[in-house]
Amino acid sequence: MTADDEPAFVPDLVCSAKGCRTPAVWALRWNNPKLHPPERRKTWLACDGHRESLGTFLSVRGFLRETVPASTLTEERT
């Protein structure tokens, strides 16, 4: 991803990492296949600094389904 492709800051969305209050620019869409139907998606938000660590946490468990710019979440709500 180049600088021109960087996701936009979306107000009121903050990183889900413990203790982080940085604005979120990424949405990590996941589900636990033992608990959730395949179409269900839960969302963790991430700043640039925590995108990799949160994604790794979910991936190791087989939960991560996709990572998208947080700005797409507001598009889904409208």
Image: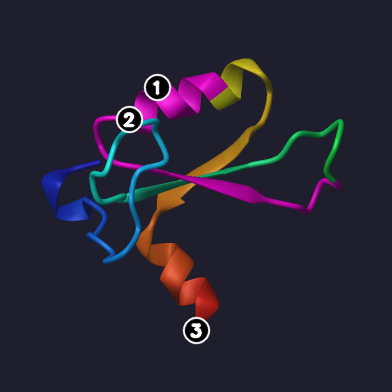
Residue 46 magenta: yes
| Quadrant assignment, res 74 | bottom left
Across and down, in percent, residue 36 comes to 83, 43
Which residue position is annotated with label 1? 53
Sequence-wise first label, 2 or 3: 2
Residues drawn in magenta: 37-57
Circle 3: residue type? Thr
Question: How many residues crowd around disc 3 within 10 Å: few (fewer than 14), some, or many (20 or more)?
Answer: few
Query: Between residues 49 and 72, which one lies in front from this camera angle?
Result: 49
Distance, label 1 to label 3, CA atoms, is: 30 Å
Task: Determine whether the residue tagged by mark 1 lies in a helix, strand or loop.
Answer: helix
Which mark, residue 76? Answer: none
Task: Determine whether the residue tagged by mark 2 lies in a helix, strand or loop.
Answer: loop
Across and down, in percent, residue 49 comes to 25, 30
Circle 1: residue type? Ser
Please indicate whether residue 65 sits to the left or right of residue 72 in the image: right
What colour scheme has been applied to the protein in the rendered image?
rainbow
Residue most extreme to the left: 3
Residue at x 13% of width, y 46% of height:
3
Which residue position is annotated with label 3? 78
Quadrant of the image containing the N terminus = top left
Sequence-wise first label, 1 or 3: 1
CB within 8 Å, label 1 to label 2: yes
Residue most extreme to the front: 19
Circle 2: residue type? His
Task: Determine whether the residue tagged by mark 3 lies in a helix, strand or loop.
Answer: loop
Does 3 sit above or below residue 18? below
